[in-house]
Amino acid sequence: MLSFGLIGAVNGVVNYAITVGVTLLALAPLALSTNDVALGAAKALGWMVAVSNSYLFNTLFTFAAESGRRLSWPTYGRFVASGTVGLTIEVLSFLFAVRYLPLSLAAIVPIGLAFVANFAMARIFVFSGGR
C-alpha cells in the first residue's frame, strides 16, 4: 500500500497541476471557471493523465507480482474502468468543494477522498492475482 500511496501522491500532483492549470489558463480567460461542465472536464482531464501514469507505475512496482510487470490493454481497461469510481468521487466532490473553498484547496480534497476507493478497486478488480 505504501508504493500505491507514493505513486498516488505523484499522480495527485499531476492531477492537481493539470486541473488547476487548465482552470486558470484556459477556463478563466474564457469566463468558464464557474461552469460545472467545464470544471468537470478540467478535473476529468487531470484524472485521465494521472490514471494512465498510475497504471504504468502500479503495474511495474506495486502490483508487480500480480501483473508480472506486463502492461496490457485489457488490464489497462480494467484499471481505468475500476478507477471510474474514484473519478466519480473526485468530480462530484470537486464540484461541491470549489463552491466553498479556494480553487487550490478544492482541487486537493477530491484526490484524497478517492485514494481509498482507487486502491480497493485496483486490488480487488484489476490486480487480484487469483484470475
Image: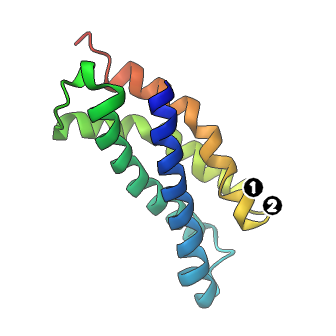
How would you rate the neighbour count of disc 1 (Cα within 10 Å): few for under 14, some for 14-19, many for 20 or more? some
Q: Which mark is residue 13?
A: none
Mark 2–mark 1 CB contact (< 8 Å): yes
Across and down, in percent, residue 97 comes to: 75, 55
Is disc 2 placed on a helix, strand or loop? loop
Relative to 125, is 45 on the left or the right? Answer: right
- The residue positioned 54% from the left and 65% from the top of the image is 17
Is disc 1 placed on a helix, strand or loop? helix
Q: Looking at the image, which residue sits at the far top?
A: 130
- The residue positioned 65% from the left and 77% from the top of the image is 33
- The residue positioned 49% from the left and 49% from the top of the image is 10
Compare residues 59 and 121 and report the one nearer the observer.
Answer: 59
The residue indicated by pointer 2 is 101
Q: Is residue 76 above or below residue 35?
A: above
Quadrant of the rendered structure where residue 27 is?
bottom right
Q: Looking at the image, which residue sits at the far right?
A: 100
- The residue positioned 20% from the left and 30% from the top of the image is 69
Quadrant of the rendered structure where residue 48 is?
bottom left
Q: Amino acid at mark 1?
A: Ala
Across and down, in percent, residue 90 comes to: 59, 48
The residue indicated by pointer 1 is 97
Give the distance between the C-alpha atoms of the residues marked 2 and 1, in whole angstroms: 6 Å
Q: Amino acid at mark 2?
A: Leu
Question: Dividing the image into 4 quarters, which one contains the C terminus?
Answer: top left
Compare residues 115 and 9 and report the one nearer the observer.
Answer: 9
Q: Looking at the image, which residue sits at the far bottom?
A: 29
Across and down, in percent, residue 58 comes to: 34, 35
Quadrant of the rendered structure where residue 60 is?
top left
Relative to 114, is 11 on the left or the right? Answer: left
Q: Is residue 69 above or below residue 22?
A: above
